[in-house]
Amino acid sequence: MIWLIGAGPMAADYSQVLKALEQESTVIGRSRESAARFTEKTGMPVATGGLTEFLSTTPQLPDAAIVATSVEQLADATTQLLNYGVKKILVEKPGGLDKASISAVAELAETKGSKVLIAYNRRFFSSLRAAKAMIEADGGVTSFNFEITEWAHVIEKLDKDKQTLQTWFLANTTHVIDAAFYLGGTPTDISVYNDGSLSWHPAAARFAGAGITDRNALFSYSGNWEAPGRWAMEVLTAKHRFIFRPFEQLHVQEIGSVAINRAKVNDKLDQEFKPGLYLQCKSFIDGNFQDMCLIDEQLKHAAIYEKMAGY
């Protein structure tokens, strides 16, 4: 049995995957309105009233739980589950509104002897999986770069909590950065620069920086939320340049050539489900955490993310 916390669009995507994996699940939501939309879309019933009310009925412990609430509720929901005794939890990125809340969850998870993992589904994109195998065959990453431009004109109109918008870099942009660090390593030294501000993200609007990782790979990044752009990443080895623009596709340039060719990748699962979600859930359910982001890793990265963001 898996508890699915949340009844929004992301929870609906998880529900589709859990059905395909033949996993029994109980969906726990808050409002009757969101529950009705969820049931209409998935055919699954929803226990309404929120997690606190659900736990007050002293249900039997599940095998695992997936937290797919809005960002401002992630840490609280995970904390409740840990205190109830749930031993395996997959929580949507970034796991909390800031480093402090992520740290509190990490400390509680250690105290309770529970596993908490952060759901960065881009690690499981077929494009990244294919590149990772080729990178290993090439002897590893030597350098990488990524762009973290967000579409501010779209985001400012979203129906999102004010705190979530103010920490949008951590809440959403880290999708790109986590994927880059997953392939290239965790920074051991980093220099960051940021400038500007937006009404909904006052910390900064323009970002740049560079550093070196624990795999001895050099990296650089940039992002301008006041200008056109998109998420992108390039990863270089001694033999290839791997280009993710968009992330769902893999383009490859071979050494000695200026030609850039799209790689043939088996992306059947990414077409059928939200990209990366099927393999991420399967790894979580199977207890195969090798390619997943444990909360301790997220805590280390959160300090870097906040520095990059100017928080």
Image: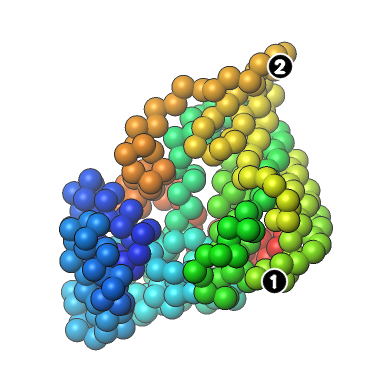
Q: Position of residue 261 (x, y in %)?
A: 58, 19
Q: Position of residue 3 (x, y in %)?
A: 26, 66
Q: How is the image coloured?
A: rainbow
How dense is the environment of label 1, judged by Cα within 10 Å: few (below 14), some, or many (20 and up)?
few
Relative side of 139 to 286, left or right? right
Residue named by callout 1: 199
Q: Secondary structure at mark 1?
A: loop
Q: Which image quadrant is residue 53 in?
A: bottom left
Q: Residue at x 41, y 44 (%)?
A: 276
Inspect this view and state whether residue 205 appears: yes
Q: Residue at x 44, y 26 (%)?
A: 265
Which quadrant of the figure contains the N terminus?
Answer: bottom left
Q: Which image quadrant is residue 152 in?
A: bottom right
Relative side of 258 to 34, left or right? right
Relative side of 35 to 192, left or right? left
Residue named by callout 2: 258
Select label 2 or label 1 by which is in front. Answer: 1
Q: Nearer the viewer, residue 21 or 171?
A: 171
Tag of residue 285: none
Inspect this view and state whether residue 188 appears: no
Estimate the spatial distance between the alpha carbons at disc 2 and disc 1, rounded to whole Å. Answer: 42 Å
Q: Secondary structure at mark 2?
A: loop
Question: As shown in the figure, which amino acid type bears the numbered disc 2?
Answer: Val
